[in-house]
Image (cartoon, grey):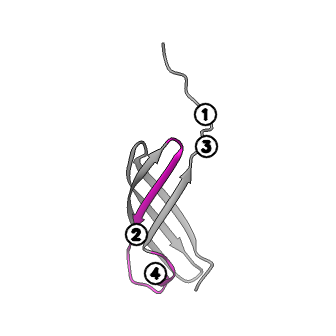
């Protein structure tokens, strides 16, 4: 198993109540690179999100064997800034 896999990700979605979205990730090692598209679904309650996504990789390279296709993610969102409501 190759532990030197670096991943870069971009994500877009709706994150309140039901969570829906997609993620694009680009994974690199010293000898290979592979990209993936991952749609995901989940639920958000207060500042906690629970997500499930499945990655579709761009090729069947050896790097693909070191990466998981499905992933369950639990996130705790810490608000940095709170916007004031207009009167």
Calculate the distance from the C-alpha at mark 2 to the C-alpha at mark 4. 10 Å
Q: Residues within 10 Å of mark 2 (few under 14, many from 20)?
A: many
Q: Mark 1 near mark 2, Cβ–Cβ under 8 Å?
A: no
Q: Return the residue found at the far front.
A: 45
Quadrant in the picture for residue 42:
bottom left
In the image, which is nearer the foreground, mark 1 or mark 4? 1
Is 35 or 44 nearer to us in this picture? 44
Specify which label sits upstream in the sequence, 3 or 2: 2
Q: Are marks 1 and 3 in contact (CB under 8 Å)?
A: no
Instruction: Say if mark 3 contacts mark 2, CB within 8 Å.
Output: no
User: Going by the picture, which residue comes out furthest to the top?
Assistant: 87
Q: Nearer the viewer, mark 4 or mark 3?
A: 3
Q: Dot 4: few (<14), some (14–19), or many (≥20) neighbours within 10 Å?
A: some
The x and y percentages for residue 77 are 57, 46
Q: Are the residues tagged 4 and 3 within 8 Å (C-beta)?
A: no
Using the numbered discs, state the Cα–Cα distance from disc 4 to disc 3 in whole angstroms: 33 Å
| Label 3 element class | loop
Q: Are marks 1 and 4 in contact (CB under 8 Å)?
A: no
Q: Closer to us: mark 1 or mark 3?
A: 3
Which is nearer the N-term, disc 2 or disc 4? 2
Is 59 magenta? The answer is: yes
Q: Which residue is mark 4?
A: 64
Tell me what residue is drawn at x 47 percent, y 44 percent: 45
Quickly name the residue at label 1.
81
Residue that badge 2 annotates: 55
Q: CA distance from mark 3 to mark 2?
A: 26 Å
Residue underneath mark 3: 78
Depth check, mark 3 against mark 2: the one in front is 3
In this image, 8 relative to 23: left or right? right
């Amino acid at each position: 198993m190759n532990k030197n896999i670096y991943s870069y990700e971009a994500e877009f979605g709706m994150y309140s109540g039901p969570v829906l979205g997609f993620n694009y990730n680009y994974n690199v090692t010293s000898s290979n690179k592979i990209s993936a598209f991952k749609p995901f679904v989940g639920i958000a309650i207060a500042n906690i999100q629970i997500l499930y996504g499945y990655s579709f990789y761009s090729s069947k390279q050896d790097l693909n064997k070191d990466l998981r296709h499905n992933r369950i993610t639990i996130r705790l969102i810490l608000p940095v800034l709170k916007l004031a409501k207009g009167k």
